[in-house]
Image (spheres, helix red, strand yellow):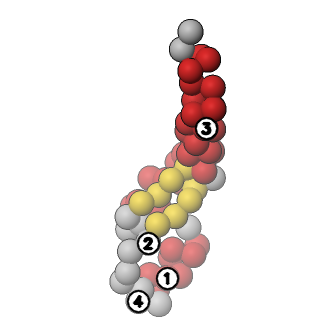
Amino acid sequence: MLTVEELLAYGYTGTITAVARYPDEVEQLENLGVKAAYNLYAEAGVACAEHAYEQFGAQLAR
């Protein structure tokens, strides 16, 4: 959050994306003007599930 606030304080007007550690931080970042904020742990879980499906999907579908 602090980094986003500092960027804005210095007049940065570009697009900002950010990774949040906690779900409530995503909303706070978006309220500050971050265009895309992601929850680190939620996204890691999705990536893990996708990877497992790619590796074992055919076996799991049986």
Name the secondary structure under disc 4: loop
Task: Name the mark on residue 7.
Answer: 1
Query: Local crowd at mark 1 within 10 Å, few (<14), some, or many (≥20)?
Result: few
Query: Local crowd at mark 4 within 10 Å, few (<14), some, or many (≥20)?
Result: few
- Name the residue beneath numbered marker 2: 16
Asked whether residue 18 appears in the rendered view, the answer is: yes
Front label number (2 vs 3): 3
Q: Residue furthest front?
A: 58
- Name the residue beneath numbered marker 4: 11
Amino acid carrying mark 2 in the image: Ile
Q: 24 and 16: which one is in front?
A: 16
Amino acid carrying mark 3 in the image: His
Asked whether residue 45 appears in the rendered view, the answer is: no
| Residue 32 picture location, percent across and down | 42, 67
| Residue 38 picture location, percent across and down | 50, 53
Q: Residue shown at 51%/74% (left/top)? A: 4
Q: Residue shown at 54%/14% (left/top)? A: 61
- Name the residue beneath numbered marker 3: 51
Distance of mark 2 from mark 4, alpha carbons?
Answer: 13 Å
